[in-house]
Amino acid sequence: MSFYEKYLNYRDFDFDGFLGAVKDEDILRILGKEDLDETDFLTLFSDKAQKHLEEMARKASRLTVQHFGKVIFLFTPLYLSNFCENHCVYCGFNSCSGVSRKKLTLEEVESEAKAIYAAGHRHILILTGESRVQSPPEYMMECVKILKRYFNSVSIEVYPLSTDEYKKLVNAGVDGFTMFQEVYNEKTYALMHPKGPKHNYLNRLDAPERACMASMRSVGIGALLGLDKVENEAFFTGIHAKYLQDKYPDVEISVSLPRIRPSAGHFAPKFEVSDKKLVQIMLALRLFMPRAGITISTREKADFRDNLIGLGVTKMSAGSSTEVGGYTLPQKTEGQFDISDSRSVEEIKQMLCQKGWQPVLKDWQAI
Amino acid sequence: MSDKLVIGGKEIDSRLFVGTGKFSSNRLIPEVIKSCGAKVVTVAVRRIDFNSAEENMLNYIPKDCILMPNTSGARNAEEAVRIARLARAAGCGNWIKIEVISDNKYLLPDNIETIKATEILAKEGFVVLPYMNPDLSAARRLKEAGAAAVMPLGAPIGTNKGLKTKELVRIMAKEIDLPVIVDAGLGKPSEAAESMEIGAAAVLVNTAIASAGDPVLMAKAFALAVEAGRAAYLSGTGAISEYAEASSPLTGFLND
């Protein structure tokens, strides 16, 4: 079975009708439950639930502290290459975007690694554009070999690979995987990814499951919020996470909540995601999956990120660059998206300590 | 009467063991330990940054405490064994709390893999304290495998739900000739006392202390509860009677 079958169960569901019929009593009943089912989860995206945001926040906050402690895990992305054959209409690295292209040499990977390590990071997430020619799995493995000398945990956010390729990367020392479906609505997906290998919806949808099958330690998913109706997309993200957690209980499943940001492509999102809506989604997710990791990146503004601490977020990127060569190279590329929180690792650590939260830079030991 | 807890040849003065995972700051750890007098402290190897003097949480653990590194993150026996060896090689001593969890939904341990890891590590000279689902047969196997104590859960880790496994833990404490330490799930000092009353040799607490409004004071409350529960166990609690005792015995007319 693939998650696609679950997707089909809801594809033609009348989300608007359901959400419009939610009553206050429904929300109160759900807030009193220990285990939420899919319908409960969806109910929490309703406008009615927004009236109960404070109660939702209190419960989400309690669950987060209970399961994770007053702790935020920090990591940073390292862009290895922005060569890309895709045509994602919202992305700064779109193959037609005219941005300068670059792929780090192994020496450059090492100098970036040194700088990121010196800033305090121990967990790193490597990213590439989709190009099997420029950044094949073999190149990723060469990079991982270098990065393992510096970092306790290396995660990948790259184009969809086969189970065997994921296994090879796991054997090379990769322990984490992230992939955003970008948009679960299949029709919108086709419009957003008109050409290139990414046009294949199913190949991407099943990639997180392939990573689970390859014994990846942690697997993170997400939808790029703003590409389609936010409630529907957040719902599909949550039930996708639940599907993976139920089927692969030994994998740590986490969810990212990226809102679409201005990029080199100057794409204007069709669906607005207000701060309130983003918080509502995060709280609903925490109540639905109390132990799931929740990541908020530097796409979000500093003061907004600070306010989210304690509500459900467990992982934050810090001191990030979305440019290839962004940490050390004099000639870097444009960024994949604009960063809204440009604080250094040290500044993020200070902010967390001031709020009474512990920044954790190392939460895995390569074994 | 002497009432010493001895594990791995070491006399331990406090029957409250503490975890270090969920505090808002590592700086709280020494204060918590001081306030409750804990002598055994568990630390997840995955969190220790051996390369950083500033971030290394081992610096926050008083030197007179026994360090009990744990294998949090291990999904099978092999990973637990590798983590344990890594901890010892890095200078964390030879105590190890085995934690093998392949279930991220409830974080319930895998007894079978835990037994395998215990067997290997005990042979290698580790003082092995396995975290387990309370199960008498598994506890017996762990003893045969060389465990120095067994650590059944009171409730799923981090839930603060209390001693939900009471009857199973009571039977283990009665039958297993090893210290039985209730690890995980205890949310309130009264539940720690309850664990001690039924014969637990010690309890291990992290979430309930770390997530308290005042962790330092809560640590002290747990220490007092553990002491009270132990004293109650040693003194033998009075029998619980279903009926009020009649002051004129109903069988008083039966003269021998």
Image (cartoon, coloured by chain):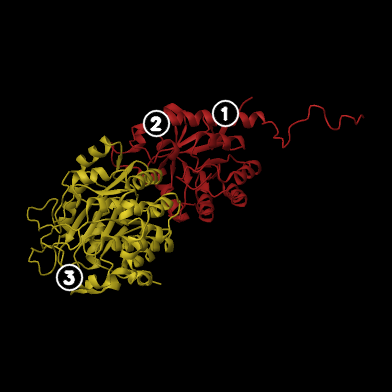
Q: Is residue B21 left or right of residue A172?
A: right
Q: Amino acid at mark 3?
A: Asn
Query: Residue B107 versus residue A256: which sits nearer the camera?
Result: A256
Q: Which mark is residue A86?
A: 3
Query: In the rendered image of this protein, which colour is used for chain B?
Result: red
Q: Which mark is residue B228?
A: 1
Residue B198, compared with residue A195, is above or below; it is above
Residue B69 in picture, x, y percent from top left: 43, 42
The span from disc 2 to disc 3 (Cα, nearest Å) is 53 Å
Q: Badge 2: how crowded within 10 Å, few (<14), some, or many (20+)? A: few
Q: Which mark is residue A111?
A: none
Q: Badge 3: how crowded within 10 Å, few (<14), some, or many (20+)? A: many
Residue B16 in picture, x, y percent from top left: 50, 33
Q: Amino acid at mark 2?
A: Asp
The residue under label 2 is B214
Residue A252 in picture, x, y percent from top left: 38, 56
Which structural element holds mark 1? helix
The chain letter for the residue carrying disc 2 is B
Q: Is residue B134 left or right of residue A84?
A: right
Residue B169, compared with residue B227, is above or below; it is below
Q: Are marks 2 and 3 in contact (CB under 8 Å)?
A: no
The span from disc 1 to disc 2 (Cα, nearest Å) is 21 Å
Q: Residue at x 62, y 45 (%)?
A: B167
Which structural element holds mark 2? loop
Q: Is residue B83 left or right of residue B113?
A: left
Residue B59 image-quadrant placement: top left
Q: Quadrant of the N terminus of chain A?
A: bottom left
Q: Badge 1: how crowded within 10 Å, few (<14), some, or many (20+)? A: some
Q: Is residue B91 left or right of residue B137?
A: left
State the yellow chain: A
Query: Residue A73 versus residue A310: which sits nearer the camera?
Result: A310
Residue A90 image-quadrant placement: bottom left
